[in-house]
Amino acid sequence: MNALLKLYSFYVRATTRWPALRSIVPFIPVIALWWIVAESGMFPRAFFPAPPDVARSFGSLVYKGILPEYLEDSVMRLAIGAAAGMALGIPLGVLVGLNSRAHKMLWPPLLFFQAIGDIAWLPILLIWFGFGIATMTFVIVYTVLFPVVLNTVLGVRSVPVNLHRAAQSLGASRLRILWEVVLPGALPNIVTGVRNGLGYGWRALIAAEMIVGTSGIGFLMFDARRAGSVVEILLGMVVLGLLWYVVDSWILVPIERKTVQRWGLVAR
Amino acid sequence: MRRFPNAQAALTFLAPLVVLLIIWEVVVRTFDVNPRVFPDLEAVAAAGYESLLNGSLFSHVGMSLWRVATGTIIALLLSVPLGVAMGVSPPVSSFFTPLVRFFSVLAGIAWIPIATLWFGYGFGAITFVIFNAVFFVVTYNTLLGVASIPLPLRHAAASLGAGRWAMLTQVLIPGALPNVVTGIRTGLGFAWRGLIAAEMIATDQGLGYMLFLARDFYRTEVIVMGMIVIGLLWLALDRLVLAPLERATVERWGMVRAA
């Protein structure tokens, strides 16, 4: 007990000095457990490989250049799709949020098309565009678009009317109200929307790569499944998880926190 | 009209959708679009009617819903207690947060390849994917919910003589409930997409399979019909079940949530 307590206090001291440890150390017991279960031979090795096997296959795939290339493909697709989704989604959201007629006309179809979901579009997209980059891009843009639009509308509508009036009575033009009142007011919601959209878009990308697949991490995993190589599937999952974890918690969450602190109308 | 405010709201909601249907029909007619590219309205209606008559639509929809229900219920039974247990003590919860986060980030579709290897093609693999999508997201949200209950509240309850059981049922669970419900909504959103994707890959029944099979024969009218069904089902699930649930819990139990 005493030794445990000492260990724990050491852990606490270490994590206060290097906060990054806090998100690394918890994985050690999990990996150890995985290793023990794999070594114990409870499951056949081909079905349940140990961590070193995965590390070795990481090494060989990086050496062959397959993994970096696939990773680049996936990330590029997501980046292009996300950029296009935001470029379309934010203006559309502002329009629907500000103009009540546009809201009446566009809100129901938006809800409906959001409900259809990206992946359900795959079959008809395959008929239209075939197995290729157009299909994939369409799916990602579609996925990112809706959370961004819906959250932007929410954000724009959450700006109190009195702020509009105050800006107007101080002589601000419509463009300036848009730029200095509406957009900053909606920004926290927009960022949340982008984050959700990327979360969904990234999953859609994996699914699309599995089904449409010519390259990318999703394709790597599904191809490995066809060949029965569990090692490469697990590798793909680890890479995906790490990648998204890093993007989400080192880029998106800090941006979200900053905007909410800076612009959030909700005082915490 | 005043007497039926609901009917009027429904009308204003439906009107744009009807306009959309008319545009669709007019465009297909005037440009004489190849039915292999996009079907006209009658073809879709006919496909829907036909699949209703021979019962295939019911069996596909029933199968999909059954899978979602099984996976979700198992996931909820496991994840809520687990989340509460991990959230109770601050050191334990801060230790587990990155772990659960990592897995909730990975939840759903990324498990399809390995699920099909472990369970074979069919019910097991798909239910596992759904279970997985709901399980980690709900665990994560429950954990956050319990951990975000202000310690003074727990101290206050304890100093008023609340035992462990009273603390659990009257402070921890109600406090975490809004987060749990948000987690369920997000998790089901991932699960629904995972379901469609998994059914395209790994089965011979269900909505996703119906769409993907129709693609092989260029039957766009079946695809579009299936997409409409998928949209309507999700809309019904989200608007009629999840959103009211979320609103009710946030209103009743939500502590400091604004907007």
Image (cartoon, helix red, strand yellow):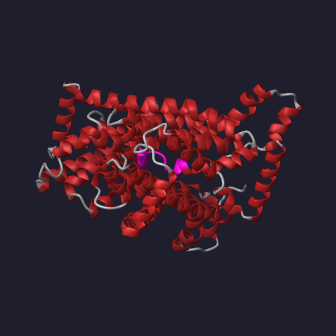
Residue B173, given in percent of the width and then of the height, sits at 68, 33
Residue B206, given in percent of the width and then of the height, sits at 30, 34
Q: Residue furthest right?
A: B159
State the predominant SS element of the stretch in magenta: helix
Magenta stretch bounds: B103-111
Residue B193, given in percent of the width and then of the height, sits at 39, 44
The part of the image, by quadrant, that contains residue A10 is bottom right
Q: Residue furthest front?
A: A40
Give the residue drawn at x 75%, y 47%. Answer: B91
Above or below: residue A7 compared with residue B131:
below
Query: Quick check: A242 left or right of B213?
Result: right
Query: Quick check: B187 left or right of B49?
Result: right
What quarter of the picture does the N terminus of chain A occupy?
top right
Question: What count of labels does the image hold?
Answer: 0
Q: Is any part of residue A257 visible from this angle?
A: yes
Q: Is any part of residue A75 visible from this angle?
A: no
Residue B28, given in percent of the width and then of the height, sits at 16, 51
Give the residue drawn at x 36%, y 41%. Answer: B117
The part of the image, by quadrant, that contains residue B166 is top right
Query: Quick check: B205 left or right of B256?
Result: left
Q: Answer whether residue A266 is magenta in the image.
A: no
What quarter of the picture does the C terminus of chain A occupy?
bottom right
